[in-house]
Image: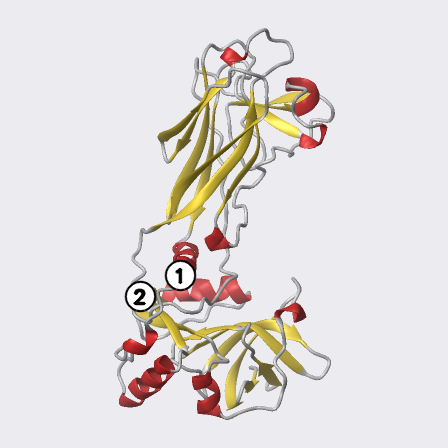
Amino acid sequence: MELDGNRNYQITQKWNFDSSNALISFVDCDEAIPSGKSITFKLQFQFAARKNGVSSPFTSWGNVLWNNVVIASLTPSDYNVHTFTTFVHVKAGTNTLQFDGAAASDSYGLTIDNVVLSSQYNNWQNIIVNGGFNSPSVGSGYSFFNGGIPNWSAAKAEVGVCHSIYNSNWPASSGQCIELDSDNNQRYTQTLNVNSITITQWIINKIAQEGKAGIESQLSCAEDQAQNKVDCAVAKLEGDVECKVHILKDTFDNYICQLYGAAQSHVQAVKDLILYKYDCKSSAYINHYGSASDADFGCECFDDNYETGECQIDEIHGHNIHCHDHNGHQHVLQVAPCSHFEGQFPIPKKGKKIHWKGKRQPCGKTYVRWATTCDC
């Protein structure tokens, strides 16, 4: 696609995120997760001057903006394909990535492809949608799109085959590019809406990877009752409780719905609650509930076809949780070191609700990948 300076145009892309990574280990129990904090992501894409039909690359320039600030000027003096890499801060709320056409507008502009925005804190998953500009398909040629293309908006976007239409230096496998000067220099803008749950999870991942543990020295994270304080202290000393995050009840309802596909939990009589995150196969967990003879399962037991459920805990034996759902059906949930487990309590409690997501086995047990307990 192409951007031109005679008029400013806008392309907008929106994302909806889920909270599929529920637990991170080894985070300070009282680690503060302030609202509005940002997380570092790597921005990478390829660009090249328009070659076909022009005599100079100097009209194929462009600017890159992040959150309305110019972070780079692209001024190629050749027709080679270049890779641009930088780092930006993604914050909760709205973020914008923009490509502006620059230099003289002659309908032959800079071409862009393969836009990726990812981070080690989200497992290097690209949060750009249609960053390869392959939708819609333009066949073997090029097309103009008033109003933009899927996941982007623009006054007049131009999309074409990189190799044959714009520049033969693009690999034939490149597919489609955008050109920044359709009939004017354009501005393409992609808008990222990142919810607070997602940004918090990324920040927790960052804290975990940087090794800020120190759990054994912090013994005051329990809530109201003396027994809670004992449970919390034991769990922390044994490395069980990893983190706690204050979360509003409405946000928690949304969190449960997003992660497990469950109906709203309707947390009662509280304005906010504390969500503890812990490794349920830690020594504190097993010592508290007793051992079990089952062998641990591995993460290879999971694929993308998870089952979800909600039930009330009846008994806990080692890493086997016996529970029943609202229809009275019994379930046996098994957890292991690769399970991600969290809840309102320093350790799971009998009589409390548990939301689970995992894989049911032929033997009747369900291997738990994610689980959350709550008094709701």
Give me the disc on residue 31.
Answer: 2
Nearer to us in this view, 87 or 191: 87
Q: Horizontal placement of 345 versus 104: left or right?
A: left
**Are there few (<14), some (14-19), or many (20+) residues within 10 Å of tag 1?**
many
User: The disc labelled 2 sits on which kind of residue?
Assistant: Glu
Say if mark 2 contacts mark 1, CB within 8 Å: yes
Q: What residue type is labelled 1?
A: Ile
Report the Cα–Cα distance between label 2 and label 1: 9 Å
The residue lying at 29 percent from left, 63 percent from top is 32
Q: Farthest residue toward the top?
A: 55
Please, what secondary structure does the residue beneath circle 2 have?
A: loop
| Type of colouring | secondary structure
Q: Is residue 161 visible from the viewing direction of this image? A: no
Q: Residue 204 carries which label?
A: 1
Tell me which residue sits at (69%, 78%) in the image. 361
Left or right side of 226 for 283: right
Q: Who's the residue at 72% across and 28% down the image?
A: 172
**Residue 245 placement, left or right of 144:** left
Across and down, in percent, residue 202 comes to: 43, 56
Residue 73 rendering spot, x and y as whole percentages: 42, 23
* Residue 228 occupies quadrant: bottom left
Q: Earlier in the sequence, mark 2 or mark 1?
A: 2
Which of 183 and 147 lies nearest the eye of the viewer? Answer: 183
Residue 302, compared with residue 1, is above or below; it is below
Q: From the top left corner, tell me how far across and down residue 244 is, in percent.
A: 35, 70
> In the image, residue 260 lies at what x, y percent?
54, 67
- Report the front residue among 234 and 309: 234
Tell me, for residue 274, which label it has, or none.
none
- The quadrant in which the C terminus is found is bottom left
Dot 1: element: helix
